[in-house]
Amino acid sequence: MTKNELHNQLADPGPFAAEITALQPRLYGFILKRLADREQTLEMLQRTNLVLCQKANEFRPGSSFTAWAFQVAKFQILSWRKAEGRSRFVFSDQVYDLIDSKSEEEAEVVDQRIPLLRQCMKRLSDQDCSLIQQRYRDGQPIASLAETLDKSVDAIGMKLLRIRKQLAECVQIALKRRGMA
């Protein structure tokens, strides 16, 4: 990275912040899978975010931000395990290696599916797309959605189920077309 590129990246943290923000749910899942403790996962996620910000100048534009962030999280977890290993039960290195190998495969599959899911979302009606976004992007409870839409909780739950099935089928078809399923 040239000095000019580094200066531009540090001068405009917007894209970097957007990458970190978008990655939070996956990073949380990545860490939770390894720690199996929600409180510890939240703490580790904060530590990881802090390290990501501190090492922002080490990220190379054009490379995979997700892979880099997961690697930082992995090293934070390893560091925690060393410290905690002396004080309480933790999994063996072999267990973590197995989890890591499976997670890398899953991350690749998810990375391939996200653009396909976005395309499938565009095919939904505006009403269905809005419902999915309110529920899963914004985290709005089903009961709240039901009240806002003047529908029963069961009706909203069934509607979401149908939309999820529709999206899953759309993604599967797109994967088959690309020879990835």
Image: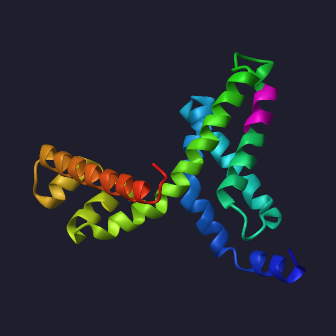
The answer to whether any part of residue 80 appears in the image is yes
Q: Main secondary structure of the magenta part?
A: helix
Of residues 99 and 3, the one drawn nearer to the viewer in this rendering: 99
Residue 52 occupies which quadrant of the picture?
bottom right
Q: Where's residue 9, x and y in %?
A: 75, 76
Q: Is residue 65 found inside the magenta-colored segment of the image?
A: no
Q: Is residue 127 left or right of residue 61?
A: left
> What quarter of the picture does the N terminus occupy?
bottom right
Q: Is residue 99 left or right of residue 58?
A: left
Query: x%, y% of residue 173?
Result: 35, 55
In the image, residue 95 sits, relative to residue 178, either above or below, namely above
Instruction: Report the number of discs.
Output: 0
Instruction: Give percent across and percent down for residue 108.
Output: 59, 50
| Visible residue check, residue 140 | no
Residue 132 lies left or right of residue 4; in this view the side is left
Please name the residue shown 22% across and 55% down the image: 145
Residue drawn 24% across and 71% down? 126
**Depicted 177 relative to depicted 104: above or below:** below
**What is the x, y in percent for residue 169?**
31, 52
- Which of these two is toward me, 116 or 79? 116
User: Which residue is at a point 73% across and 41% down the rendered structure image?
Assistant: 74
Q: Quadrant of residue 30?
A: top right
Q: Which residues are magenta?
A: 77-83
Q: Residue at x 21, y 50 (%)?
A: 162
